[in-house]
Image (spheres, helix red, strand yellow):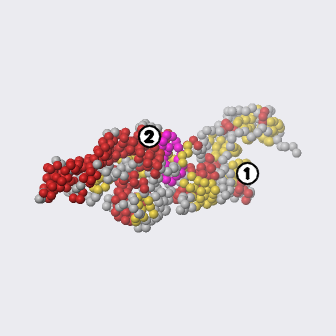
Amino acid sequence: MSNIKNINVIDTIKSNYMPYSMSVIVSRALPEIDGLKPSHRKLLYTMYKMGLLKGQKTKCANIVGQTMRLNPHGDMAIYQTMVRLTRGNESLLLPYIDSKGNFGKNYSRDMAFAAPRYTEAKLDEICEEFFRDIGKNTVDFVPNYDNTMDEPTLFPTTFPNILVNPNLGIAVGMASNICSFNLGEICESTIALMEDEDADLLKTLKAPDFPTGGELIYNQTDINKIYEEGRGTFYLRGTYRYDKKNRCIDILQIPYTTNIETIIDQITELIKSGKTREITDIRDETDKEGLKITLDIKRGTQVEQLMAKIYKYTKLQDSFSCNFNIIIEGYPKVLGVRNILLEWIRFRIACIKRGLMYEHEQKLGKLHLLKGLEKILLDLDHAIKIVRETKKDKDVIPNLMEGFSVDKDQAEFIAEIKLRNFNQEYILGKTKDIEKLEKEINDIQSSLESEKKIKKVIKKELLLVTKRYSKNRHTKIIQQHHIEEITHEDLIEDYELKLFRTQDGYLKKISMASLRGNSEQKLKDEDVVLQEIETTNKSEILFFSDQHKVYKKKTYELSDCKSSSLGDYLKNILGCQENEKIIYMVVTKEYGGYMLFFFRNGKCAKIPLSNYETKTNRSQLVNAYANSEELVHLMYIEKELDLVAKTKKGKLKRFHTNTIEIKNNRKSQGVEVLALKKGDTLVEIERKKMSK
């Protein structure tokens, strides 16, 4: 017990957890301005040092082994990094590695990559733009983990690679998700920003572009937010082709964010759950030609409506959430596309300046040596004499320095010249470059002092990269307003059916296809069918109760049943009160026609059915009809017709419904259709029978 110490948790977090989290953020998970994470950079630099930029492919196992000199995190971690960067995996718009063998596919969860001993790789041609001038002090180098070699902290990329390939990173407490853009559009936008930092990016950078193609649903406000703030969401959707001859749909491209197995699983679930009845079979027909998911469909299927349903309920339409969190000079920052490109321009300017300073120093050194060589041109014999008459080797350099007034470096250069080259022709051949060197040094000095000239170099490089590597867009752009807004009801399957309401309060919904096989209805003992209505699955049903209420249901909300079943008990599905009874059912789509309510006192309320229509999906309405008098009969009419009223004492009256005044108040008692004598009441309403 005496060994227990009180430890301050905050101090422990600061000393242990914070260094770990910062290491993950800065040195592992988030990309830097060259568009690469440390693991990518270590792998590509190793391949460069192995001569794989120009040489032949070598086994990936060899590359992985060599990379462990810079990256000690395990061979499989290195190989998985390599797989994603290859042309074969199809994860990148601009692959860094030219591959041979099976590297799996980014769009498939189950297509596994082969072991590194079976696959081969070399750097792709685009990597020339990563390593150009890397030996001219354009970027910093640091020792590797065991101080046996140096590695670059960044690559001096000649184009904004940070935005050309998709990049996902999950650090500690923060993450990054960068979408990819078309190389040509990025280079054009970078040039535009070099000329005007406030240039309209929407004119040159159309939208993100992905290696898996598909369609991007374009919303200018959302895209502009991503360009300016670095955060935002847009939607991607797959593309399909309808094969009318074979009656099938071929899905040929899917969103970058998903895979074929997920989509197949989700479509299968739609079929199992009954949300779609049009698909008879689904197959994965992906092969060497590319991705392909085939859906066999029934005859008469509305293809666009079916695909709208699949887009809504599966990952065939998926969102991409942008979070442009990158490391700038050692610190994570969330930047929009504009500011990322501006940061890259500053980075590239710094790289070029460092390269020019390196060349400047090299040329100055060479000029200095040639100036010394020039001094012996006038008296070659004296130089030879000094060397010949000097008795000790260590005195040659000092004697040359004294004899020709040159410094130690110049004397060393002179002394290293072979005896056979101590002639006027050789010396003149060397010193004639002095004037050229002086001009080059002045040009370099002029460039170093002019950012405009450096930007001109960057522009030239960007145009060259565009010419050599740019390709057409993979992802098509479709305007958001061109996509029809799909509601839940649009996705409901519509079909013909018949509704049966019974005296004991049961309701049956039976498709016409099912009725053709068996039209005889199973009912409870002594139960009878009161109403039988033909309609479709997208109609609306109004149930009037004896408690002056109307309950509303969409037909598709009711479950289908067979003739052999009793159906649904209305009180249960509507939530009626214990003593409440459904007395009438109306089926409608457009809410046209009228409701007629006949009361014991001989009056009739003619209410437009539209008075029961609501903008919100209310399930019940109170005060469906007047409650001051006993209801004798109610009925729904689509058009005016003749009726016959019958009283308790046997009086009959024929009348036409167009003579009844329309009332818009549902609680109205209506107008008198039958004058009653004292003690008489209305008992029955019948439709006038057609004469033969």
Left or right of 63 on screen, residue 238:
right
Residue found at x 15% / y 55%: 385
Q: Amino acid at mark 1?
A: Val
Residue found at x 46% / y 58%: 87
**Residue segment shown in magenta:** 203-220
Q: CA distance from mark 2 to mark 1?
A: 77 Å
Instruction: Bin the neighbour count of mark 1 within 10 Å (Cα to Cα): few under 14, some 14-19, many 20 and up.
Output: some
Viewer-nearest of discs 2 and 1: 2
Residue found at x 52% / y 59%: 261
Q: Amino acid at mark 2?
A: Ala
Regarding residue 500, the answer to whether it shows in the image is: no
Q: Which mark is residue 192?
A: 2
Instruction: Bin the neighbour count of mark 2 within 10 Å (Cα to Cα): few under 14, some 14-19, many 20 and up.
Output: some
Secondary structure, mark 1, is: strand
Question: On the rendered image, what quadrant is the C terminus found in?
Answer: top right
Q: Nearer the viewer, residue 389 or 354?
A: 389
Regarding residue 392, the answer to whether it shows in the image is: yes
| Chief SS of the magenta region | loop
Residue under circle 1? 529
Q: Nearer the viewer, residue 509 or 318?
A: 318
Q: Nearer the viewer, residue 604 or 632?
A: 604
Q: Nearer the viewer, residue 224 or 33?
A: 33
Left or right of 402 on screen, residue 40:
right
